[in-house]
Amino acid sequence: MRGTFLESPKRYDATYDFCFIGIKYCSADYLKGVENAANEIRALSYRYANADSTARPLKVYNPDDGFILSDTDIVDFGNVEASNMEMLRDKLTKISFPFYAVPIFVGGDHSVSFELIRKICNSKIYNDIVVVQFDAHSDYIDEYEEYPHGSVMNEVSKLSGVSKIIHFGLRGNLNSGPAIAHSKRKGNFIVPYSKIEQEYDNILEELDGKNVYITFDTDFLNPIYAPATNCPEPGGATYEDTLKYLKDFINVSGCVVGMDFVEYNPNCEGSVITGTTILNIIMQSLHYLTVKNNTKL
Ligand SMILES: [Mn+2]
């Protein structure tokens, strides 16, 4: 269907295993642009939809994995648009999807993840969720009212359904020492980018068999691959490393209960390269999730 993610059918048109949900929300004027991320990703995804007017199966192919989305049933729920947090919460409450469908939330600044994870927790289907935060920053400061995108993980950690946060890939001079120390005291797992290799087996052990929610901040990536984000930090992961981490984490988990992709700002320089990188990370994640589900059957 024209205008949707990978020309997917819209909600109610089909059965599905995954739902693409755009989050059209920005918590602060100086972050403006992030609310357009989902529509930009949809626009960039046309290139990967079938050129011969057949809607499915998708023929996206790469030399490493072969056809990556031929078994993937995804629908596009459109956008959840909100001008404040209460409205976002209210609109999210009204959305429902079957328990087996994995929501892929795209767009917004990082503040939205609190409402997204809260929604998953309130479904009562999952508890004891480990949140893996791909991010250069811990987002664990204590001032949710003033800096919602910088304190979102502090709020997430208070949700009763969340057992632990893994801050994965921290680096750079926009971090807060007291915030990281606070999170550590709370029993969360701090993984600086420089320690990923050293801590890798411990991370896999933490995720083994667990309910896992993945929140992906664009600035986890080296800004060479993804410059269009509000708080870029020099250094960071390559595209290939990122795929390896996602594949391993998805495979070792018991169940991935949801994913979000935030902090992509199409208004910033390098929008197309960033959007293309994020879009491909989403497609590859869908592939890893589909393979995992099919292996389980
Ligand atoms: Mn960040």
Image (tube, rainbow, N blue to C red):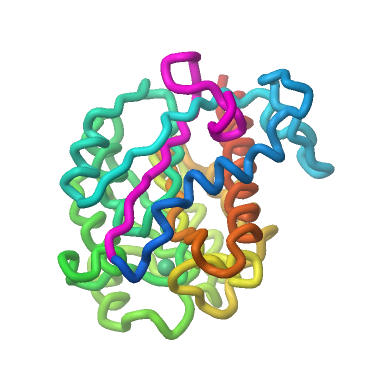
Q: Which residue is drawn at 58% across and 37% down?
A: 286
| Residue, far right | 63
Ligand 1's image quarter is bottom left
Quarter assignment of residue 120: top left
- 184 vs 264, nearest the viewer: 264
Q: Eyeballing the image, is 112 above or below 263?
A: above
Q: What stretch is highlighted in magenta?
A: 1-28
* Residue for point 44% across, 73% down: 231
Side of 181 where 67 appears, left or right: right
Question: Horizontal placement of 165 versus 236: left or right?
Answer: left
Q: Is residue 24 magenta?
A: yes
The spot of residue 137 in percent (x, y) is 40, 71
Q: Can residue 202 be seen in this view?
A: no
**In this rendering, would 258 be left or right of 242?**
left
- The residue lying at 24 percent from left, 72 percent from top is 141
Horizontal and vertical percent for residue 297?
57, 19
Q: Quadrant of residue 49?
A: top right
Task: Tell me the quadrant of the picture where the N terminus can be found.
Answer: top right
Dominant secondary-structure state across the stretch colored magenta: loop
Residue 55, placed above or below residue 123: above
Identify the residue shown where x is 61% and y is 26%: 72
Asked whether the viewer can see residue 119, the reply is: yes
